Amino acid sequence: MKLVFLTSLVPVKNPKSGYDIANRVVVDGLLSLGIKVKIIGYLTPGETPAYPEDTIILDDLEVTNSKVGKSQKIKWLMKAFTTQTPVSVAKMLQTSPQDIQSALNACRPYDGLFLNSVQLPGAFIEQFGKDEFVFLAHNVESASAYKNALNASNPLSSFLFKREAKLLEKLEARLCQEAKHVFTLADADRAGLKVEDKSSYLPLVTKFDLPNVVTNTNPKYDLGMIGSWSWAANRSGLDWFLEEVAPQIPELKIAIAGNISNIPADAPDNVEFLGRVDDATEFVNSCKIIPLISREGTGVQLKTIETFEMGLPTVATTSSLRGINQLPQNCIIADDGEAFAAALIEMIDKARSGEQLKLDGKDFHRAQLSQLLKSLELGVKHFDVSQKELQPS
């Protein structure tokens, strides 16, 4: 079987963001099933494609809002209004339908398309809709946009998020309706997209081969969190933690890694903001406990999966556990500030008394990877090709 993987950003050699990690793992999964894959999409500036010989790069493109200037954001907004598309989709219109068609023609013959997330497929749905395709929804994008509209700080932002949500909802509905099969990264998103009868969810891993992680015997911080805090859903969780949890545990040393704007002036004194760190794995391994603090959103939390793969002890909200089949024994669930703080104190007391809280994360990784491959195999068998058993390599 030969598929074309259509994606806003192509898989890269050294993935860093959650989106890049998911892209790389899904393509690696397809390849391990013996499927030939060609890739079409944009390349993040400064990155190297993971599979250069099988990748057609449309152009270099920076899509992260926090990494572009005001003028670029205005251009995206103007493009969105003139083309009647969501802003996230308008970013993809840096190339033309003719270039998309030429790229597809260069990949022929193929058995079908694998449409990865809504952005690039939404921008060129007329071109991609001519072929059979499966669709991977990383999130229920429209639901996230509606939530952002409710939490917006001013009427203009609320209006723009509502516009984004309505347009994304139409695109998601069309892609799900026309797809041979729909994949999601969290089981609950199947209901959110109304595709329970033609879908499966993909439990993710951060990489196919899990490296050995050396345990830090002298962690610097009691608690540590790292994330993309410019994303509204992540920031909502962080603000909740700083307001509802951190003031209850003043004796604990807390570190927040990752770029963050508008650091709260009243943040507790025991919280240290580190900004971007050179090595995320080294950072989380320098913390005794990892609070997983998501309060909203769809899709999966890659930081949760990475934490479980490392075997680190956690206290987690229910929302942080989206897309997880089986919880490690060193994870406590708590959803209100008082219970969350109490669970953290309980774990820290155990750690300080010498109790071994870290686990071997390989069992978790193995279970997630096995189900990922089974779900991928189930979905791609919906293409109308001669049915040959896919054999994992």
Image (tube, rainbow, N blue to C red):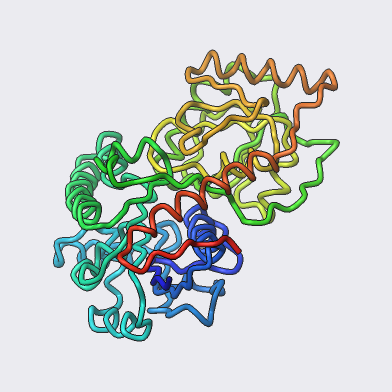
Task: Name the residue nearer the viewer: 161 or 54.
Answer: 54
Q: Position of residue 73 (x, y in %)?
A: 31, 62
Residue drawn 53% across the image and 79% down it: 52
Q: Residue 45 at what x, y percent from top left?
A: 49, 73
Judge whether 4 appears above or below 274 on screen: below
Answer above or below: position of 36 versus 230: below
Q: Classify residue 7 as left or right of residue 356.
A: left
Q: Is residue 368 above or below residue 36?
A: above
Picture coordinates of residue 126 (x, y %)? 18, 70
Nearer the observer, 94 or 169: 169
Image coordinates of residue 173 in percent, x first then y, are 20, 50
72 or 40: which is nearer to us? 40
Would you identify the image quadrant in which residue 189 lies? top left
**Residue found 65% across the figure and 52% down from its top:** 277
| Quadrant in the rendering for residue 32 | bottom right
- Residue 351, by quadrant, is top right
Which residue occupies 30% across, 57% down? 118
Q: Is residue 115 left or right of residue 16?
A: left
The quarter of the rendered structure image containing the N terminus is bottom left
Q: How many marks?
A: 0
On screen, residue 208 versus residue 128, left or right, reads right
Q: Residue at x 25, y 62 (%)?
A: 122
Quadrant (top left/top right/bottom left/bottom right) for the C terminus:
bottom right
Going by the image, does 366 lie left or right of 239? right
